[in-house]
Amino acid sequence: MRLSIRAQIMVACLAVILPLAVVELYYVLDHYASAKRHSMSHARESAQAIASAATVFMENLQNGAQVLAQEARLAGGDPRRVQPILERMVRATRTQAYVVFILPGGQAGASVPQEVAASRVNFADHPSFQALRAGGEWQPINLTQSRVRGIPVWGIIAAVRSGDKFLGAVAVTVPAMEFDRLIPVKMPAGSWSIVDGQGQLVFLNGVPDIPWAERDRSQTELVRLALSGDEATSEGFVGADGVKRLGASVPIRPLGWVTVVSEPLSDVLVGARRQAWIELSVYGPALAIAIFIALFIGSRVGLPLKRLTTAAGRITRGEYGRTAEPGGPPELVRLTTAFNTMSATIARRHRWDEALKAIGRVAASRMPLGEILAAGLEAMMGASGATLGLIRLVDAATRDLVIAAYRDLPPSYLEVASAVPWGAKLAGSVAATGEPWLVGHLQEQPEVSHLSLLADRVQSLACLPLKTHDRVVGTITLGHGQREYFGPADLPVLLQATSLLAGAIVAEQLRAATSREAEEKTLLFRELDHRVRNNLAALISLLHLAAEGAEGAAAESLQEMAERVARLADVHNLLAGRGTQPIEVRELAEVVAKNVLAALPGGVRIHWKVLGVPIRIPPSQVTAVALVLNELLTNSAKHAFPGRAIGSLTILVAREGDQAVLEVRDDGVGLDMARVPAGLGLTIVRTLATQNLKGSVTFAMAGDGGTVVRIRFPQPEESPAGGAI
C-alpha cells in the first residue's frame, strides 16, 4: 500500500532530521562524558600525588619523632636533659614545628616553643597518648585545635621506653596550613583535603580555620570507601558545602588517613554546556519544526492507534470486552472494527470459561442438588447473556419434566407449567430426542412452549438436554428478549456446559442415593451389633447360672465355657466399629489379659505386662489369637503358682521373618515336658494355632524357672501404605 502524501512528508522529515539530531546528541553527551573522565583522571592523579607527599612527610616526621624518642631514652626521660635535644632538632628543620616531651603522667615536661610546657597542658586523656601508654610504638596525631596556640596541628607521637618502663612520649607536630607549602600539588582553595581515620577533617587547602562541628566527613561516600583501603571515585556526590562535586579519594596507608580531591560538577561541565548550547541553537529549531510537522500529520493516525492500544492493554489486564472508537484513515477504521469483533469474542469465551469453571467447582463441592442447579443456571445465564432460565429434571416415577430451578419467571408461569410430560412441548421433545432446539421467533410459534405466555419479555429460546452417556436427566431452557439471539454457533459451548452440569447432577444423585444406602446399612449394623452383644451377654449369664447349679467337673467346665464366650464378647467389642481394619496384637493381648486375670478367683496376685513390636492382624485371626491367649493365661493363673501369693506373666509379641511370634511366659513351677497335659484348654490352643492360624505351638521350660509357650503363625510385614508386602 502506498503511503499518503502526509505520511510521506512525516517519514521524510523524521528520516532526515532525527538521525542528525541523534548524532549531535551523541556528541553533546560525549562532551559531557569526556569532561567528567578528564576531571576524574586528574582528581585521581592529584589525590595519589598528595597521598604520596603526605606519606613521605609523615614518614619524615615519624623518623624524627623516633630519633628524638631514642635520645630522650638515653637522657633517662629527664625533661631538663631532653629540652636541649628538642631545641637542636627544631633548629635543624626548615619546617615550622611544635615538639613536646610528655611525661608518663601526661604533663608536658619539655617543649619547643617552651610556652607549651609552661602552660602545664596535660595529654593524659588524648587517645594517641593512651595508645602509647598501653604498649604502642607510635601514633598519628590530629589536633583540630592546638592546646596552646589554638590552631590545627597534626603529626606523630612516639613512645619513650627503657626496657618495659614507659618514660613518656615525644610529639612532633606541624600546623595544618603548612600543607600548602609542603605538598607540591597546587590547586584552587577548597579543592583537596585530608581526613583522619575517624572521618574528621585534618586539613582543607586554602581554608585556615574550620569549626569543629563542620569537620565530620565520615558520612561522605568517598571517605568511607578510602578508609576501607580502596581508592574511590564519584561523578556526583554532595560535599560539605552542599554543592554537587566530582572527585577521587586515595588512602594514606601508613596513617590510615584519606586524601580527597574534588571540584564542583558545574565547573567541570562548563565547557560541555557551552558546546551543547551551540549545537542546540543550530539543530534545535530544525528539529522542532520537523517534530511539529510529524505530530500534526501523525495525529490522524496516532490518536486512533492510541485508543486501540489502550483497549488492547486493558484486555491483557483482564478487562475483557473493551472496544476502541474507530477513526483515522479507512485502513485503521477496518482494523479497529476487526479488533472490536475480536474483543467481543474473547470476552464471550472468557465468560464461558468462567462459567465452566464455576460449574466444575460446584460439581466437586458436594453441595446439595438444589444449590448445584441454582449455581449452574446462574453461571450459564451469566455467560450466555440470557434474561431468564429454568432447569427441569426427569421424575423417575412419572417421567414428567419437573421444574427444579429457575430464574426470573413469574408465579403465573410456574402454576401452568410446573411439569411437562415426556415428549410434549419444547422441553419434553428435547428430552425425548436428546437434541437441542433453538427458537428464534417465539411469537410465531406460541404452541412450542408455555414461555409464549411471556412473549412481551421473551423472543428467543435455547432448550438443551442435560445428558450423560445417552441418558437424559433433564433439560435447561434459556430465554432472551432479542430475536435470533441464540444461533448454531452458540451450541458447542452451550452443550459443553450442559454436559458438565448433567455430570454434576448425576454425581450428586448417585452420592445422595449412596449416602441413603450407607445410612441404612449403618443403622442395620448398629442393630446387629446390639443384638450380638445382648445374645453373648445372655449366653454368658446362662452358662454362669448353669455352673452355679452344677457340681464338680461339670461346674468347672461350664465356668470355663462362660469365660471363653466372654473372650468372644471382648473380641466383638474390640472389632465393633472398626470394619475390616486390622488389630494390633499388643492391644488385643492387653484386653484379654486384663479381663482374664481380673475374673479368675483365688489368692494369687499376678503381675502381667505386654511387650514387643507392633504387629497388626486381620479380623479373621483376632478371635483365634484371643482364645489362644485366654487358654494360656487361664492355665498359667490356675496351675503355675501353687502355694504362692504373687506371680508374674509376660506376653511378648515378636516377628521372625514373615512369621508372627506370640509368647506367653510365667515364673511358676514349670511344666513337665515329658508329660504335657492333653486337657481341653491345651487342645483348643493346639487346634487354633495349627488349623485356624496355620502355625505351630511349642512348650518349653524357662531358663530361670517357669513355662514358655510360643505360638508362631504366618503374618507378612505391612507395606508403608498399610497393605501386606
Image: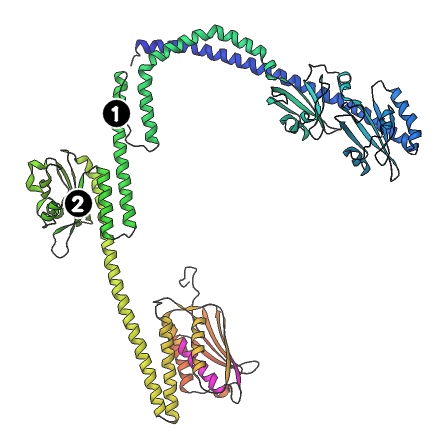
Q: Visible in this render: residue 265?
A: yes
Residue at image x 28%, y 24%?
Answer: 324
Q: Nearer the viewer, residue 425 or 216?
A: 216
In front of the other: label 2 or label 1?
2
Amino acid marked by disc 1: Ala
Residue 683 falls in image quadrant = bottom left
Q: Which mark is residue 390?
A: 2
Residue 631 drawn in magenta = yes
Residue 352 drawn in magenta = no
Residue 597, horizontal then vertical, whole percent = 45, 81
In this figure, what is the number of numbered marks?
Answer: 2
Q: Main secondary structure of the magenta part?
A: helix
564 in relation to 452, above or below: below
Residue 591, horizontal then vertical, whole percent = 43, 75
* Disc 1 residue crowd, few under 14, some 14–19, many 20+, Cα 10 Å: few
Amino acid marked by disc 2: Leu
Q: Circle 1 sits in a helix, a strand or a loop, which is it?
A: helix
Give the Cα distance between marks 2 and 1. 35 Å
Q: Which mark is residue 338?
A: 1
What are the residue bounds of the magenta stretch?
Answer: 625-649
Query: Is 35 positioned to the left or the right of 394 in the image?
Result: right
Residue at image x 78%, y 35%?
Answer: 125
Label 2 with label 1: CB-CB less than 8 Å: no
417 in relation to 31, above or below: below
Residue 409, horizontal then vertical, whole percent = 15, 43
Q: Circle 2 sits in a helix, a strand or a loop, which is it?
A: strand
Q: Nearer the viewer, residue 210 or 258?
A: 210
Residue 616 falls in image quadrant = bottom left
Residue at image x 27%, y 33%?
Answer: 347
Q: Nearer the viewer, residue 578 or 701?
A: 578
* Disc 2 residue crowd, few under 14, some 14–19, many 20+, Cα 10 Å: many
